[in-house]
Amino acid sequence: MSKMPFDIHMLNPELKLNTKLFDKNVEQIPIRQGFGEGLLEAGEKDQKIVGLCADLTESTKMNLFAEKFPQRFIEIGVAEQNLAGVASGLAAMGKIPFISSYAMFSPGRNWEQIRTTICYNDRPVKIAGSHAGVSVGPDGGTHQALEDIAITRVLPRMIVISPCDSIEAKKATLASVDTGTPVYIRLAREKTPVMTTEKTPFEIGKAQIFWKSDKPQVGIIATGALLHQALLVAKALEGKIEVEVMNLSTIKPLDEKALVSFAEKVRRIVTVEEHQITGGMGSAVAECLAKHRPVPIEFIGVNDQFGQSGTPEELIEYYGLGTKSIIKAVEKILKR
Amino acid sequence: MALTDDKVKELEEKANKIRISIIDILEDAGSGHVAGPLDMADIFTVLFFHTLRHDPRNSTWPERDRLVLSNGHICPVLYTAMAYADYFPIEELWTLRQFGSRLQGHPHRDFLPMLETSSGPLGAGLSQAVGMALADKMDHGLTSQRRIYALLSDGELESGATWEAAMLAGKEKLNNLVAVVDRNNIQIDGYVEDIMPLEPLSDKWRAWNWHVIEIDGHNMEEISDAFDAAKSVFEKPTVIIAHTIAGKGVKEFERDYRWHSQLVNKNTEQMALKELRTLGGKLDVKDAL
């Protein structure tokens, strides 16, 4: 790691991030698009990859794979329990199955099948849950998964990844092929800012500091598209409050080493996620730090509520997940 | 291939030995299910000692048939058939349900990797078997010699997940898939037809485009013939509805739903073993098996 100049705060140059990410017209692409492209590329490289979908092939962007490899695509219909079990059977015969639906239905509806036939059975099925978070928007609360991180990270053997943008989602999809384990990849519906580039390194289980500061007063840990809100906060507070921002896209296994050294450096943490506070990424961080390096933590997330219809912006604001709420949490934790 | 009279006799004797071991190990274990394992002993015997293409000495042989036990709670019959087929030493059966045993209360591949699936929660096995059959079709098309056998209870047909899998198997014309339903008409809370009627059961399977064969699940020739007949069915998966007598072989257990999971204690063990060894009193104790 190169030595940081004195008193500097900036985007981490080592990560080759999108330098235009603070621009008003920053490029925006749905995270699910990255999954679709990643699966297509993975399918081109590896004949063992099969795709299964429960009547949401285009919505989950599995259509890219299905059109290129119809003989390796299986339309399951509206039957998410079967989606999980059939994938387990395919994996038992040496295939590497990817299953996709909305996160509310898979891993939501079929959680027990995922537990027993995939995790307990030790089958390397990859689960893409799209339309996670309140930013699904007008479809309303039934379709806004806010519990999926909690129910997947509790499962033995499961890897849980919540990519911050479409490019990271593509890399996560490709990296998930070779883990030999079940993997859950959390995807969002709406177009969201592209923060990384093709050159940004990605490794499952590695947290990354996106915004650096040599004298941070607060650390923000974010996962998913809300990472962009966290970076906007860091930029907005420049010269007033020094913050450092971590992208925690792999929620399980947790990068404990990086978290502990982050906590030692920043000493106060705000976690940011589009998920219930209970059981989510912030909880995972708290479990780790309570044991290894206790520091005060404020949790930005949905507070024991269901979602509703609205524009993504309205809902992010209403549920207290945006820049205003993050700034409040930063100010609050400075007083703790 | 039809069974010879000698083969029928050999299979019947094997099935009886398997029943004796089931009673013996369940009493030792102090818990576990009794009626289902006893009534499926004949079908497991035909599978392991006649029908299955498998190699107990090379359990990962890729070309092997796959046997998916969906209702994992009847695993005493699976373990016993496997032991008698030489997958592992017969003595190991007496570790059933003990801490550290490969023979978990419900089958778990972590402990016994030669199992095709871990199972227990009902209604999940047919989906996995469908996945296996689909993979086989993708790789080998109609030329595949492999058969995927899914063994189901009748009670678990109350689970909607089973029918999700049945629909997909019909749609995909999985003629390499054979499901066997243990139609013993019992489950924990009572008789299946009281708890949740399944009839007309064969019509239900036909409606999802399955080929249906109904058999006496204790007649070795009918069991074997049904498996053979399934091989000549193209364009459809086959379901064999095996009419069985819950607790078969021990009169005191037979047809009584309470023996689904009732404890086998020392007294019932002795009674049951005597009945099985004398073939229900047909043999003198001294001539017993």
Image: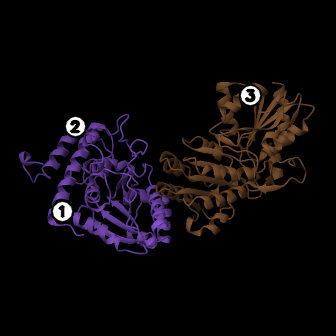
Chain colours: A brown, B purple
Picture disc at residue B8: 1
In front: label 3 or label 2? 3
Q: Is residue B214 visible?
A: yes
Asked whether, in this view, residue A98 is left or right of residue A312, the answer is left
Taking depth in this image into account, of A55 and B190 the one nearest to the observer is A55
Residue at image location 68% in from the left, 28% down from the top? A289
What chain is tagged by disc 2? B
Residues at marks 1 and 3, CA–CA distance in whole angstroms: 72 Å
What chain is tagged by disc 1? B
What chain is tagged by disc 3? A
Q: Quadrant of residue B1?
A: bottom left
Taking depth in this image into account, of A42 and B98 the one nearest to the observer is A42
Tell me residue A250's x, y (percent): 67, 42
The residue type indicated by label 3 comes to Ala
Tell me residue B167's x, y (percent): 49, 67
Which residue in the structure is indicated by mark 3?
A263
Q: Quadrant of residue A303?
A: top right
Tell me residue A123's x, y (percent): 51, 50
Which residue in the structure is indicated by mark 2?
B266
Number of other residues with Cα within 10 Å of mark 1, as a class: few under 14, some 14 to 19, many 20 or more: some
Name the N-terminal-most of marks 2 and 1. Answer: 1
Mark 2 and mark 1 on one chain: yes
Picture disc at residue A93: none
The secondary element bearing badge 1 is classed as helix
